[in-house]
Amino acid sequence: MSSSSITEEEASSQSSPSSTLRIALCQFNVTHDKEKNEETARSFLERSKEKGAIMAVLPEIWNGPYATTAFGEYAETLPDIGDDLTDVDKSKWSSSSASRMLMNAAKDLDMWIVGGSVSERVVTDEEDDEGKKIEKIYNTCLVSNPDGCVVAKHRKVHMFDIDVPGKITFFESETLTPGSTVSHFESPYGEIGVGICYDIRFAEYAILLRQKHNCSVLIYPGAFNMVTGPAHWELLQKARAIDNQCYVVTASPARTEEPADSDDETKKYPHYTAWGHSTVISPWGDVVATTDEKESIVIADLDLTRLEEVRRNIPIADQRRTDMYALEDLS
Ligand SMILES: NC(=O)CCC(=O)C(=O)O
């Protein structure tokens, strides 16, 4: 045997995805204090590592308030796919403390991090009537591999623009621009798809991740609310899991109550009450792990052999009537 030969065990681990993925969902209180939020996120990531997680997921908009009027103030210039910590000081995103925290944590802790989302500022080449460059703000998720390198960057595709009179009105598109990529990344656990919160309502997006990009896990950092959370959060996760015979993973901020003190700095932006309940659903539609509204780290072991079993038992992928209907990836 030559010295470059590999054992059968090594060969099988190279040719097929690893079969169990321990994932941690970091559900924590998000405050108005950016620095404090970064410290909290880092400490939840460290605790996830201590619990044996290989991958950790943060919530949607974890570095500041989830409010259309706050997105601009908290926005940062973010790295792109392929960027890592080499020469960060010379990079245009060097002032992004959120990105630095995520990439450093991934490297220090030797973990995959699906970095929830933060608001991203992009200065375009377009100019307004006064010749000033037009800026766009996106709701963006960065995924870092254990080398601290960005392997996916998802800009929320579907804007959370809803009006349920007397209950909840929210228009992300007042300040945010939608992205236009179907986002996924390769990992030792197979291809993993990424969406953000409201994206989970769109079956077509998840179907593309499964059918065109062969994803086994769909991850949605999210922040549902007290109206749609109890009604739709778990059902939507189950629907996407069953439609696509994939694991579906969500991570939400913990629920914080509206502060009573009207002089408080925290009154600067309207309060958004998150539903919480970060969850993992299996390809069969079972709840693998979940929590309530309080701070917690949800740990789940994703058995990837279960995917093959469910797909073999109910072979919808082969039974699809592609002579009757089709879904195209136009992105
Ligand atoms: N942050 C969001 O996209 C919220 C989505 C939501 O609550 C919904 O009902 O959908």
Image: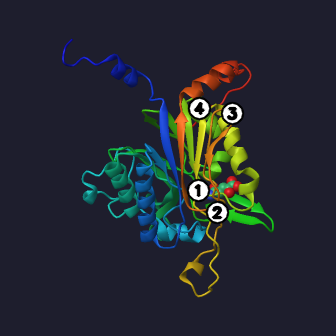
The count of marks equals 4
Name the residue nearer the viewer: 74 or 224: 224
Query: What is the three-letter code of the residue carrying label 2?
Result: Ala
Q: Residue at x 50, y 48 (%)?
A: 24
Query: What is the three-letter code of the residue carrying label 1?
Result: Ser
| Sequence-first disc among 4 and 2 | 4
**Any atom of ligand 1 within 8 Å of the CB at mark 3?**
no
Q: Find out whether the residues at labels 4 and 3 contact each other: C-beta distance under 8 Å.
A: yes
Let me know if residue 319 appears in the view: yes
Residue lying farthest to the bottom in this orientation: 263
Q: How far apart, in angstroms, are the residues tagged by discs 4 and 3?
A: 9 Å
| Sequence-first disc among 3 and 2 | 3
Q: How far apart, in angstroms, are the residues tagged by discs 4 and 1?
A: 23 Å
Where residue 259 appears, as percent x and y from the top left, is 62, 79
Colouring method of the image: rainbow
Q: Circle 1 is placed at which residue position? A: 252
Work out which quarter of the rendered image holds the N terminus and state it. Answer: top left
Query: What is the three-letter code of the residue carrying label 3?
Result: Asp
Where residue 87 appears, as percent x and y from the top left, is 24, 54
Q: Circle 4 is placed at which residue position? A: 210
Q: Residue at x 69, y 23 (%)?
A: 316
Q: Find out whether the residues at labels 1 and 2 contact each other: C-beta distance under 8 Å.
A: yes
Residue lying farthest to the right in this orientation: 165
Q: Callout 2: helix, strand or loop?
A: loop
Name the residue nearer the viewer: 286 or 218: 286
